[in-house]
Image (cartoon, grey):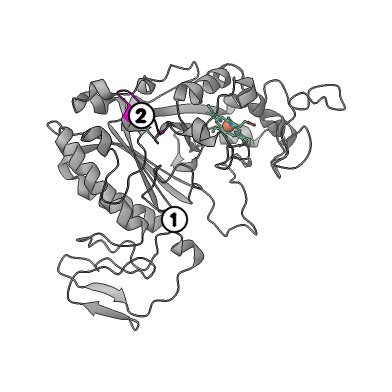
Amino acid sequence: MSRRRLLGTAGAVGAGGLVVGGLGGASVAEAVREDPDPLSGVGSATVPFHGDHQAGIADPAQAHGHLLAFDLAPGADRKAAAALLRRWSATAAELAEGRTPKGDDTGIALDAGPSSLTVTFGFGRSFFDRTGLTDRRPAALEPLPAFTQDALDPKRGDGDLWVQIGADDALVAFHALRLLRKQAGDAVRPRWEMSGFNRTPGATPRPMTQRNLMGQVDGTNNPKPTDPDFEEKIFVPRDRKGPDAWMAGGSYAVVRRIRMLLDTWDNLPLERQERVIGRRKSDGAPLSGGGETTPVDLEKIGPDGALAIAGDAHVRVAAPSANRGATMLRRAFSYHDGFRDDGAPDAGLLFVAWQADPMKGFVPVQRKLDRGDGLSRFLRHEASGLFAVPGGCAEGEYVGQRLLEG
Ligand SMILES: C=CC1=C(C)c2cc3[nH]c(cc4nc(cc5[nH]c(cc1n2)c(C)c5CCC(=O)O)C(CCC(=O)O)=C4C)c(C)c3C=C
Ligand SMILES: [Fe+2]
């Protein structure tokens, strides 16, 4: 405690500095660093909450993630939902800046900086009926079609409200989860929660594309914010008109819990693993040649006279060029929830795909993968959700305000 001072009043020290949170009970004074040690790069990194788009979409996926869905409690109406989103937005904005919301006595994130915390809010299809807003429900929220290989658990899918939390520190991420849950009180009932992870920044000698639990470099051919058509493919146009004009600047999130049959996969020889994806495992380079970022050549014939990228290789079947340009931004977290009764790991990918319209992103691609993807033998789609994620808000506003007050 040598560098700390106990304050008799509640208060938070702002961004850049830090500190915050109480030490336990509500009557306990808050501990504040008088002369804080500088934060590491990871701890001090911030992602602004306010902006045209919500945070947690086009920025890199963090090391820790929580995906949560809530249903509105019986009797909670549009007004209650508006009050909740106002409160949640204010809290998310404060946390993203490294400030502690008034009254936070958890102490969970004490000492830590914002660590690239993002909180992203979305609405599920059922939200609109529950709040009397059915006529404002976007057509894009039509339920996803059933895919033949789906084995979905409805209790772990969909929901009225969806929250995605990401941070490069596990306690910072949990802190946000804890506060948002507390603030929601009786207005909502938790429906499902899934937690996941990615590689921690700084764990590799240089920044690299993530690896998934199958060991593959995953994310290479994602659309980039610098691509000329990125905005158009991923976000709803800013000049959107009609009943869902409130979605301007927003995006649609498809969330799939995809279990990997890791024991089966790990028994597959390397060469066959690479054939299934169409890329090298070591560095993610396409089997058609070059390095990780070399464009995939789907026409290339190998020395054996066969296609270098097999007919059922995942990258061939999923490629935009094979799906009339269908494009999505994949921003996933790995998960491991212990072991199943048969001893196999309950592990895989919390796959989150972002697009301006699911019918021009996830749906056509998944239809094709469902039929002809070599990777699907090693996967089980176990839960699914589709959420309308409104555009970002300015300071003093809240996410979803145009819907809830428009
Ligand atoms: C419906 C869309 C997709 C699902 C579901 C999906 C699941 C899934 N994918 C991997 C691993 C990799 N996917 C890769 C590329 C890739 N995947 C999709 C779509 C879905 N994947 C697309 C559109 C692409 C890009 C295709 C292209 O344009 O080349 C790759 C290669 C590296 C990369 O580009 O990211 C890997 C590896 C897993 C493990 C998985 C389910 C658990
Ligand atoms: Fe994929």
Confirm if mark 2 falls within 8 A of ligand 1. Answer: no
Whether residue 239 is in magenta: the answer is: yes
Secondary structure state at the residue bearing disc 1:
loop
Q: Horizontally, is 135 left or right of 79 in the view?
A: right
The N terminus sits in image quarter? bottom left
The numbered mark at residue 7 is: none
Q: Is residue 330 visible?
A: yes
x, y (%) of residue 183?
21, 49
Residue 176 or 81: which is nearer the viewer? 81
Q: Horizontally, is 280 left or right of 367 in the view?
A: right
Residue 39 or 198: which is nearer the viewer? 39
The numbered mark at residue 116 is: 1
- Image point 27% across, 31% down: which residue? 160
Instruction: Name the residue carrying label 2.
Output: 157
For the residue carrying disc 1, how many other residues have a C-alpha within 10 Å: few (<14), some (14-19), or many (20+)? many
Secondary structure state at the residue bearing disc 2:
loop
Give the image quadrant in which the ligand numbered 2 is located.
top right
Residue 266 lies, with reference to residue 51, above or below; the image says: above
Residue 245 or 172: which is nearer the viewer? 245
x, y (%) of residue 388?
36, 31
- Image point 32% across, 53% down: which residue? 93
Q: State the extent of the magenta-drawn residues as a range.
A: 238-245
- Image point 54% across, 57% down: which residue? 201
Q: Quadrant of residue 140?
A: top left
Q: Amino acid at mark 2?
A: Gly
Q: Is residue 374 visible?
A: no
Residue 349 or 404: which is nearer the viewer? 404
